[in-house]
């Protein structure tokens, strides 16, 4: 086994685990880092590896919130059986998550493949305009996050959320199909604009993201199954997929725990400044490479 590929699979798994939950865009990092270092191995740019990374982050968010998911599932089933939500906060939250998933699911199904063709076509070099566009999107989300920190009072908890809050945050999540936006970045930013406390905005973002991550993983697994039926998929590189999966799962779990604690006492400004610095660096590197 090539140790360089093992190292690359670990790095990409760690990147996925970090950037899926920090508001700094996993899709942009997973495009930019291989482009920057010239990592073009077919295994690490393949659909199976992408599936492995997404399943890793799905496992991390399910594992961290396993008690919440059990409670929410019971509450959701009970609300359907009794045909009422009532004053139960868990029933209400279960429906808020379901409603919030709708915009992302619809827009993702309609437009994700077209956006991927523009920004990350398989087996094609990353075009300069695509790199510049990602950098600008990267910086723009940083600006919105900066404004959200300063224009809203972050006093509301998840129990005070209304159905329109879920719809608006879900609509923001739909923008994550564009590399550089960040699913967690968009939803946390929207939550902050709506006056949520920072850690509550992040917590709702992670809970809302789990069904979308699961849906994306299932779609990718279906695509993978079709490739396997055509004989286009082999199992010889399974070890690399497992390494990427494990790296993403472990890092994702630790990242969720870190961010929820961090946002209890700190603002999101560090991620804003990171976005602006990274955007400038990406543009500079892209122009130097021509």
Image (cartoon, rainbow, N blue to C red):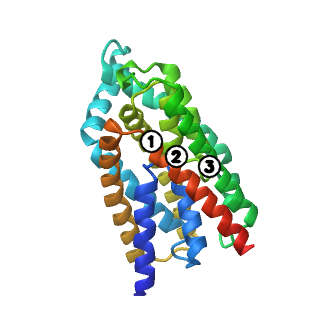
How many numbered badges does the structure rendering display?
3
Q: Which residue is mark 2?
A: 272
Mark 3 packing: few (<14 Cα in 10 Å), some, or many (20+)?
Answer: many
- Which residue appears at 65% of the width and 49% of the height? 137
Q: Which residue is mark 1?
A: 268
Nearer the observer, 108 or 31: 31
Mark 1 packing: few (<14 Cα in 10 Å), some, or many (20+)?
Answer: many
Q: Decide if residue 104 is in sight here.
A: no
Assign the N terminus to one quadrant of the image.
bottom left
Return the disc, 3 or 2, that comes first in the chain's sequence: 3
- Which residue appears at 48% of the width and 30% of the height? 192
Is 51 on the left or on the right of 58, as rendered? right
Q: Are marks 2 and 1 in contact (CB under 8 Å)?
A: yes
Label 1: state its secondary structure. loop
Q: Are marks 3 and 2 in contact (CB under 8 Å)?
A: no
Give the answer, above or below, for where 18 lies relative to 62.
Answer: below
Label 3: state its secondary structure. helix
- Which residue appears at 37% of the width and 32% of the height? 200
Give the answer, above or below, for where 146 lies relative to 112.
Answer: above
The Cα–Cα distance between marks 2 and 1, rounded to whole angstroms, is 7 Å
Counting from the top left corner in percent of width and height, residue 135 is at 65, 56
Counting from the top left corner in percent of width and height, residue 270 is at 45, 48
Q: Which residue is mark 3?
A: 139
Counting from the top left corner in percent of width and height, residue 170 is at 53, 33
């Amino acid at each position: 086994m090539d140790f360089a590929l093992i190292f690359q699979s670990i790095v990409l798994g760690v990147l996925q685990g970090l950037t899926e939950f920090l508001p700094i865009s996993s899709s942009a990092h997973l495009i930019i880092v291989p482009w920057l270092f010239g990592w073009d191995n077919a295994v690490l740019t393949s659909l199976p590896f992408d599936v492995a990374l997404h399943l890793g982050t799905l496992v991390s968010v399910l594992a961290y919130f396993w008690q919440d998911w059990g409670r929410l599932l019971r509450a959701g089933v009970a609300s359907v059986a009794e045909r009422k939500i009532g004053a139960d906060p868990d029933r209400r939250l279960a429906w808020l998550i379901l409603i919030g998933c709708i915009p992302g699911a619809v827009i993702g199904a309609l437009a994700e493949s077209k956006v991927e063709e523009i920004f990350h076509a398989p087996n094609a070099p990353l075009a300069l305009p695509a790199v510049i566009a990602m950098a600008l999107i990267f910086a723009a989300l940083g600006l919105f996050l900066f404004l959200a920190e300063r224009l809203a009072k972050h006093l509301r908890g998840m129990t005070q959320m209304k159905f329109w809050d879920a719809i608006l945050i879900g609509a923001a999540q739909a923008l994550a199909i564009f590399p550089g936006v960040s699913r967690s970045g968009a939803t946390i930013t929207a939550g902050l604009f709506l006056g949520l406390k920072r850690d509550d905005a992040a917590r709702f973002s992670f809970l809302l993201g789990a069904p979308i991550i699961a849906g994306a993983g299932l779609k990718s697994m279906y695509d993978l199954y079709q490739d396997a039926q055509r004989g286009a998929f082999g199992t010889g590189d399974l070890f690399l997929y497992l390494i990427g999966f494990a790296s993403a799962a472990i890092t994702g779990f630790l990242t969720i725990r870190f961010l929820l604690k961090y946002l209890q006492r700190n603002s999101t400004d560090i991620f804003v400044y990171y976005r602006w610095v990274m955007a400038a660096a990406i543009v500079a590197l892209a122009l130097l490479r021509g």
